[in-house]
Structure formats: structure tokens, C-alpha cells
Amino acid sequence: MRFVRWCFWMALAASGCSASEGGTSATDTDQTSGGTDPGTGGEPGGEPGSGAGGDDGTFGAGAGTGGSGAGSGAGETEKGCIERASFVYVLSQDNELYSFRPDRKEFTRIGVLGCQTDMDPNSMAVDRDAVAWVNYVYPDDSAGTLFKVSTEDASCEPTGTSLSDGWSRLGMGFSSDLSRPDAEELFVAGTTNMPGIGLGRIDGTSLTPVGEFSGSLRGKSAELTGTGDGRLFGFFTTSPVQLAEIDKETGDVIEAKPLPGIETPSAWAFSFWGGDFYFYTAPDSFDSPSRTTNVSRYRPSDGSIDTAYMTNIGFRIVGAGVSTCAPVEQPR
């Protein structure tokens, strides 16, 4: 997601905090009965960040086929991934990590990220080993970096990646090779400059530019998410906002779809799960101090947009991620 500095067309094959509408409570991982622990939602320093998008996962055994039950995170799904890798994860501007179950409208607090940095959290992606990759950036965008964060306990380690020259503030998402699902890559969108500089990929500690976005979305900033069937999508905060499928080899926009009704946000993130896309949006906290994040859902299978999926969840989300182990169909 990002603090703003300021597709589709094809239907998919199949297919906290207490929210004020239709939400459930956020629970702490060390609690067995659902106590609430919403974040404080203080305003982040600096300009818009970007949130990492990702796919979501089945909550329980059988990722991709829709098992039942929460799963302990220790076993493997039929995709060969640990169960924890099929969850959606979100990052708050208060540097807290949560898991998210879209089918239950439930956020569960994991903990405060242990990253040793004076930069601000900005964006997140999650790999197939259930490791979150978190982008931190200085408020003036002079430099950024990536940390690897455990989705089990929020512990953190540096990656040695140094980001600058227009790539300090990122949108992020992993996408797999359809013929080799385990061969995933971390794609990023450069959102430091206005206009944005398009799509890149992270290889080890190096960032390689891929190309600018095309058409009317050239120069626009995007949050990214991948899907378990090898595709890459961007959430563009235009007015109205747009969802676009992106060519991973060139950065070209394959197809874009406006999503009227979803707010053009100041803090934002985005993820895919079970055939649907989830948009996490909040306005500038100076203009709307009592507003936290709303969660909207777009369902490609029937074209529906649910802007009241969850509202005012109690904290502000700046990053979201889910791995390519996530299901591409609704769990049954």
C-alpha cells in the first residue's frame, strides 16, 4: 500500500479490529478467545508509500481447492507450500503485522516488526516460504531498503538491498512462472518519482528495471499483486482507481478496468485471494483523523464491487501481501 504521493475483463476460472460494517474482531496470536487489539492508526511520516499486494490463501488444508479449518501453519498444502504461506498478510503504518482471512473478515495481530531501522514501513510482499518482504523508506524518499520478516512472529532480518534512484519507495508483489510454480520472482513498481518509472524486478540484492507501464497508465504509480496462476496485476490510484493486468516481461498494460466507488486513497494496499481482489484504502489522516482503512472487494467472476466489505477496521494498512501458494478459486 502506499501513502499517496502523489483490469479485468477476463473473469477468473472460478469463480483487527472491529470493523464498523460487516467485520469481525482482530485477535492477538497469543490469545485463544478473540480479544481485540486494533492499532492506533497514527499518521506515517512522509509521502505516500506503496503497499505490496499478493495473493491470498486457503485457510486450512488444500490451498487452491479450499479446505476447511484454520490450519496451524505447520503442515503442507497440496501445492507443496506450508499452510501459513496461503494466508493474506497486512502491514499497518504503526509497524504491526497481521494475518487476514477474507472469508471470515478477520484480522489477527502477529506482532510489531522487529526491523532495526529509522525508516518508515511502506510496502510488503510474501513469498512461497511465508516470508514477508517489507520495503522501508525515508520520508523524503532519499533511500529505501528491504527486510525479510517472519509471518510467524514478526522477527526481522536485513536483505542487504539498497534502493535509490527512483526506486526507494515501491509497490511489490511476487509472481510465479506458470510452468514452474516454485520459480517465483519479486516484481516492484517504482513510485518515488512523479511520474512513476514503471516495473522492475528484484534479483538477490539487485533491482533491474523492466519497462514503463503503457497507455493511459504510463507514468502512474501502482501497487502490485501476483496470482497463483502466474499473472501480475497493478492497483493504480487514478480517479476512478483502476485494476490492470501487467506483462511481466515488458511492463505493458495488458488490460485495465476502472473500479468506480472505490476511493482514491492516501494510504493503500491490495491483494488477491480465492479469485477476488481486495483493496485496502484510507484517506489522508489530516483531513479525516477518525477514518482508518476500508476493505473493498472486486469479484471478476460477476463484476461486482463491494465497497462495504469491511469499513473503518481500526488501523491504517500500508502494505499487503500473499504468496503464489494462495488459491485462485473460492474455498468450498
Image: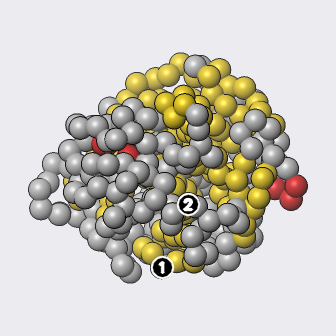
**Residue at position x 48%, y 79% in the image:** 308
Left or right of 12 in this view: 316? left
Occupied quadrant, residue 122: top right
Q: Secondary structure at mark 2?
A: loop
Tell me the kind of residue under disc 1: Ala
| Residue situated in front as seen by the camera: 250 or 221 | 250
Image spot of residue 31 (x, y percent): 14, 54
**Residue at position x 31%, y 67% in the image:** 104
Occupied quadrant, residue 263: bottom right
Image spot of residue 293 (x, y percent): 47, 66
Q: Is residue 16 visible?
A: no
**Residue at position x 29%, y 71% in the image:** 24
Occupied quadrant, residue 154: top left
Numbered circle sitting on residue 13: 2
193 over 203 or under it: above or below:
below
Q: Which residue is mark 1?
A: 308
| Residue situated in front as seen by the camera: 224 or 325 | 325
Left or right of 314 in this view: 238? right
Residue placed farthest to the right in the image?
A: 215
Tell me the kind of residue under disc 2: Ala
